Amino acid sequence: SDDVLVMQKALASSDEVIDIHHAGTAMRFLTAYFAFQKNREVVLTGSRRMQHRPIAPLVDALRKMGATITYLEKEGFPPLRIKGSQLNSHKVQIAGDISSQFITAILLLAPTFKDGFNIELTGKITSRSYIEMTLALLDQLGFSSNFKGAAIFIAPQIEKEKSIFTVESDWSSGSYWFSFVALSKIGSKINISHFYKNSLQGDSCLVDLYKNFGVEATFLDNGILEIKKIAVPNCSHFTCNLVSAPDLAQTIAVTCLGLGISCELTGLQTLKIKETDRLVALQNELKKLGATIQIDNESIALQPPKKLNQNCIIETYNDHRMALAFAPLSILVPIEIKNAEVVSKSYPDFWNDVQVIMSK
């Protein structure tokens, strides 16, 4: 996917200017990475949208650790000039109610500190599942950590032997196949690979959430997950707090729309700083299909129409999840998705997979 390729290219590059385009994850992780590269100076930049996505909480934390980072344009936003140095502080405070990627960016550096590293999370912790996922992955790779209350400690381990690690498939990407099945007739099924019952990913809650929509997920041998429509939905109104899985909001909202189910999704405060303001984008596009939508800073409420509007043109706002989430509606009504190639950010083979599924 684009995000992986951008990260690989940046890590291998010796250029003075590193452009990560739309890759928000790369921007956060590389800001911390380059701050720690002694005698290296880079300008880290991205797309126009990236230059409107806040990064001040991470920069402030890294500065407290001794990093030298300068905003080149608007205060609090990329592009950044980063002068790498040996960071000496072994502890930092950072807000817990921000993007978990700010916290993960520091966690990935933490094992290299000779005395270990302490992070104190302040305020409400809104993305605990993603933090726990990072720590569990570090543990699987041999790095020891402890997370109690609002305090995280990472034990020091400067050197690590080479090893091979198999990465599980992405449950966020898997969510679109749950939606396809939910909107299909009873008996329809899709198999997807490399998904495991004891997943570290918060989005694996899909298995339980989609039971409400008549979908059963069964873990088969060799990491195969069978998704099957076994019944009509068991609810006419769906409510869910997605604070631990906000990337599912678009998928679930579209599923509910297609099934004619009203819904209220909360815990979505981080969606406003994604590739687009996803709450506003959802409101705009769901209305085109006939839905009544209300949003605030952290929630969306949907009332479906009696009949979906056809031949709507769905804008994607350079956001891969808008294209991915609305695609399953093609089972029910003809739609057009603009800039459909934006899926390359996380799922470059998506449209080929859709073609295979629809042909069956």
Image: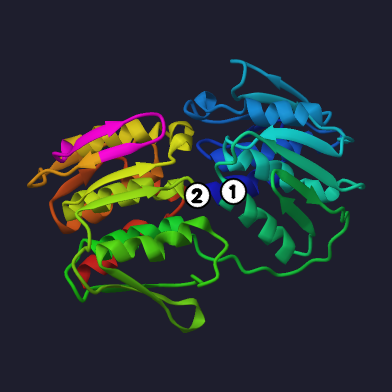
In this rendering, position of residue 112 left or right of residue 174 = right
For image coordinates 31% across by 40% down, the residue present is 339
Q: Residue furthest bottom?
A: 221
Q: Tell me residue 157's x, y (percent).
A: 87, 56
Label 1 SS: helix
Residue bearing mark 1 = 128
For image coordinates 21% across by 76% down, the residue present is 187
Report the disc number at residue 244.
2
| Residue 104 in which image quadrant | top right
Kind of residue indicated by mark 1: Arg
Closest to the observer: 15 or 222? 222
Label 2 SS: loop
Kind of residue indicated by mark 2: Ser
Q: Tell me residue 351's x, y (percent).
A: 32, 57
For image coordinates 76% across by 41% down, the residue present is 119
Q: Please say whether residue 67 is visible from this viewpoint.
A: no
| Residue 354 in which image quadrant | bottom left
Boundaries of the magenta span? 288-301
- Decide which of tag 1 and tag 2 comes sooner along the chain: 1
In this rendering, position of residue 33 left or right of residue 126 = right
Asked if disc 1 and disc 2 are in contact, CB closer than 8 Å, the reply is yes
For image coordinates 18% across by 55% down, the residue present is 259
Q: Residue furthest left?
A: 307
Report the disc number at residue 213.
none
